[in-house]
Amino acid sequence: MNQEKHGIVSLAAPALLLSQNPETEERPYSEYNLIITAPNHRDIIIEGVQILPDTIAQQNVFMHTDMQNKTTERIQIEDNTLWGDFPLKIPEDAVKELPPPTGFVVLPQVVIPEYIVVHAGVPDDTSAPNYYVPFKDYIKNVASSEVYANWPTETLVANILAILSLTLNRVYTEWYRGKGFNFTITNSTRFDQAFTYGRNIFDEISVIVDNIFNTYITKPEIRQPLFAQYNDGQRVNNPGWLSQWGSKYLGDQGYDHMSILRNYYGNSIFLANANSVAGVPSSYPGTALQTGSSGSNVTIIQEQLNAISNNYPAIPKMRVDGIFGPQTRDAVITFQGIFNMPQSGIVDFSTWYRISHIYVAVAKLAEMV
């Protein structure tokens, strides 16, 4: 039935049972190809749009008006991770090492960014594009890629909270920026979680994300979102990780989302809320620090370089006064030389995060001594 008034088209989908059982050998969703045209816009072909039974799928489209380029844009939707063959996640610590309270190398508080910068490949793939994605759209995309939207509502809430927490941990700890990359997260399931540019999302997931997008999982003894790792629970079932299929069965039994989460992450977890901020949050001040600069950001660099010099004595100590003078410039130049960076004496984006990364490492060593 074509319900043109509401923009809804009814399409054939496989039997519901297929998306409720991991043992199926038949794809649990139908795939359709869309050809989208509009006057004075480039055509788009979207291949592999997924339709699940008892759900409503949304296909949002951004059409380019650059008519000098007549090439048709093609988008290929990857399989849901529960069905397709994806690289297995590399385990990480659920709670990341953070610097001492005096070090400002992560965001000062947990925030909901306006945008997530998604790297469409493994971290070291410099040929992969970066996508600037509105935060809620990113979470909806990942959830639609990782679970089935016709699962119990409490199961969906639990899985979305895990996705939110994992994402916000990457934001808060500046995990990739601290390693010198210019993105927030990757779409590689080996390192992060699935994201496919241009894929369709589901109403059932969209409504939940709109209601809980500023909520994350944490623990009483930590000040960061839990890095809430998860797996399918069939091919891989790591202890302490949420099992996607296991959470589905718990939802079938009437468990609420907190009971599901505590079953995997422990009874001490609780939910917290974060404030939204504009743009893409970053501890980098946005302007390079150099001779003549002053203020709290210069103080941070001076404190961190002095701490680093305890392990790298070639770096001269300096007075911590918040003024970027000759002493600070000499320390920056020496640091850049030791770590094979251009010796500009300027704390640009790369140098800021390299100093931060080394500072965290030496602070950790000091705690172990």
Image (tube, rainbow, N blue to C red):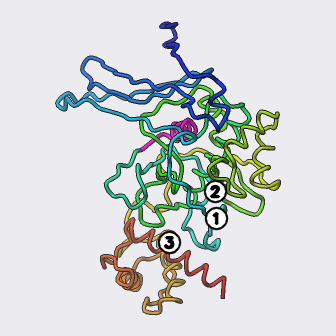
Which of the two discs, 1 and 3, labels the residue nearer the N terminus?
Answer: 1
Residue type at mark 1?
Asp
Image: magenta residue range? 132-145
Q: Quadrant of the C terminus?
A: bottom right
**Element type at mark 2:** loop
Label 1: which residue? 93
Q: Do the residues under discs 1 and 2 have CB atoms within 8 angstroms?
A: yes
Picture layout, residue 318 above or below residue 144: below
Picture layout, residue 309 above or below residue 45: below
Decide whether the magenta segment is chiefly helix, strand or loop: helix
Q: Residue at x 67, y 36 (%)?
A: 156
Which of the two discs, 2 and 3, labels the residue nearer the N terminus?
Answer: 2
Label 3: which residue? 356
Which of the two discs, 1 and 2, labels the residue nearer the N terminus?
Answer: 1
Picture layout, residue 307 above or below residue 260: below
Query: Looking at this view, is 198 or 223 the one in front?
Result: 198
